[in-house]
Amino acid sequence: QQPVQSPQAVILREGEDAVINCSSSKALYSVHWYRQKHGEAPVFLMILLKGGEQKGHDKISASFNEKKQQSSLYLTASQLSYSGTYFCGTEGRTGNQFYFGTGTSLTVIP
Amino acid sequence: EAGVAQSPRYKIIEKRQSVAFWCNPISGHATLYWYQQILGQGPKLLIQFQNNGVVDDSQLPKDRFSAERLKGVDSTLKIQPAKLEDSAVYLCASSLSGRDKFFGPGTRLTVL
């Protein structure tokens, strides 16, 4: 039931782009994205509620493909502050159960 | 606006001892969650409250873990007795809408 994220880890240079994928084996109602910096609590980034919905702010955006039960997080022109572990969280159609994904460690270097 | 408060921030105990964590959610947030995050893994939901009622505690090891949310505000999570595998960060989160979750700083528990 835990969504699977890929890649597990990625290293970028400042200014490069990255895509993080989140895949679930269950039908989804919503997908959430969080970022967690080392030693800190997760911080909410965005939520996608409809199939096909895309959201974003600044240079971080996400899409949700309801049919494929997948979501992708897009980071463009990455900044040092983007470093951290990114978690997707999925909410199923049948109930309130919410599961965090396996996580993707993203490191941006100068 | 004050965030989610948790205490203590760190706790070291020996196995078989008891420990309790406290959480004060954001004012007005009806939904409160306790998560366990083991190093290198995503947070795992232990229990979810809606006001002072339990919505989901399916992953709470009820033989040793207990939680309560009296008066629908503060909450405590207790472990009795603790095992080595309980070493983790315990995160409390609250939500107004039941969707976006605001996390507290967490309590890092080390069981020796």
Image: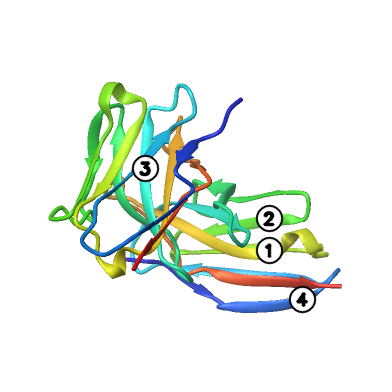
Secondary structure beneath dot 4 equals strand
Residue A79 horizontal side relative to residue A30, left or right: right
Residue B56 x/y as whole percent: 24, 45
* Disc nearer the start of the sequence (1/2): 2
Which mark's residue is nearer the viewer, 4 or 1? 4
Mark 4 vs 1, N-terminal side: 4
The circle drawn on residue A74 is 1
Say which residue appears at 50% left-offset and 67% top-offset.
Answer: A22
Residue at image coords 56%, 54%: A34
Chain letter of mark 2 equals A
Q: Which residue is mark 2?
A: A61
Chain to which the residue tagged by mark 3 belongs: B
Residue that mark 4 sits on: A12
Residue A102 at x, y = what percent? 46, 70
Residues at marks 1 and 3, CA–CA distance in whole angstroms: 28 Å
- Graded by Cα atoms within 10 Å as few (under 14), some (14 to 19) or many (20 or more), the crowding at tag 1 reads some
Q: Nearer the viewer, mark 3 or mark 2?
A: 3
Secondary structure under badge 3?
Answer: strand
The residue type indicated by label 4 comes to Leu
Q: How is the image coloured?
A: rainbow
The earlier-in-sequence mark between 4 and 2 is: 4
Q: Do labels 1 and 2 touch, CB within 8 Å? A: yes
